[in-house]
Amino acid sequence: MKKLSIAIIVIISAVLIGALAWLNFFNASKQTACTLEAKICPDGSSVGRTGLDCEFARCPEITDNNPGWKTFNNDKQAVTFQYPDQLAADYIHSVDWPPQIAVNNGPFSCVEGGSEIAQVGKTQKIAIGDHEYCLAKESEGAAGSVYTQYAYSFPENGKVLTFIFALRFVQCANYDDPQKTQCEEERRTFNIDSIIDRMAQSVKWK
């Protein structure tokens, strides 16, 4: 009787081992049957399907809020921010770029008034998305172009930060079509506000 019990146990164990081996082989076969599709990730890399359910692998985490932008370090002010090396424009050119950054004690305030073409320029409070800025702007024409000086001020960590730079806008009337139309369309759609807002949100303190 004892020999029969041992034999039964051996048989049951062999059946279980065989079943586990077949299950592992089945799962391995199922895993290798994933299609060779690839998914493009936000950083430009690609991932394939994997696992028992052939789901796409996770994309690499992006630690850079603005891929392709450069980082400006201001050791004197102990602050850094990201900025695009070049503006995506053909008839609008950056001057004093990347912007200078000034750091002053708060609180943040904005006294509106003036005119953009006046000597003291124009100051106005603007909202970009959910963020508030005080924008001082002054424009002057020279040699077939209009130069506009910008100063975007915003609150940050109990301080008031200001980005200072200038843009040169080529007079579209200097061109014949189709360049003239392209220039006018670029002028109409160009949005420096959104670029500045992204730069402001990238500010970090050393």
Image (tube, helix red, strand yellow):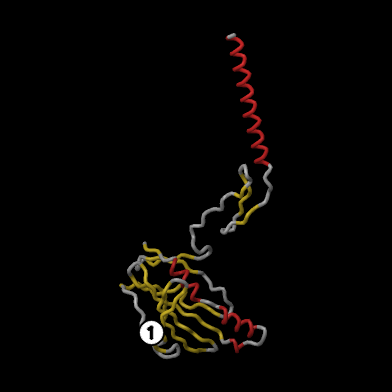
Camera-side residue: 119 or 31? Answer: 31
Q: Is residue 123 left or right of residue 172?
A: left
Q: In terms of secondary structure, where does tag 1 sit?
A: loop
**Front residue of this view, candidates 56 and 121:** 56
Image quadrant where one finds the N terminus: top right
Instruction: Using the image, determine if residue 77 lies above or below residue 30.
Output: below
| On screen, residue 26 above or below 139 | above
Residue 188 pos. (x, y %): 57, 82
Check disc 1 and give the amino acid type.
Glu
Query: Residue at 61% across / 43% down in the picture?
Result: 51
Give how far across and how far down residue 187 sits, in percent.
57, 82
Q: How many marks?
A: 1
Image coords of residue 159 (percent x, y): 33, 70
For label 1, count other residues whose C-alpha is less than 10 Å away and answer few (under 14), some (14-19) or many (20+). Answer: few
Between residue 16 and residue 189, name the one nearer to us.
16
Q: Residue at x 39, y 87 (%)?
A: 113
Q: Which residue is mark 1?
A: 112
Residue 29 drawn at (x, y percent): 67, 38
Q: Establish if 152 lies above or below 6.
A: below
Q: Quadrant of residue 186?
A: bottom right
Instruction: Establish if 114 lies above or below 20.
Output: below
Q: Residue furthest front?
A: 1
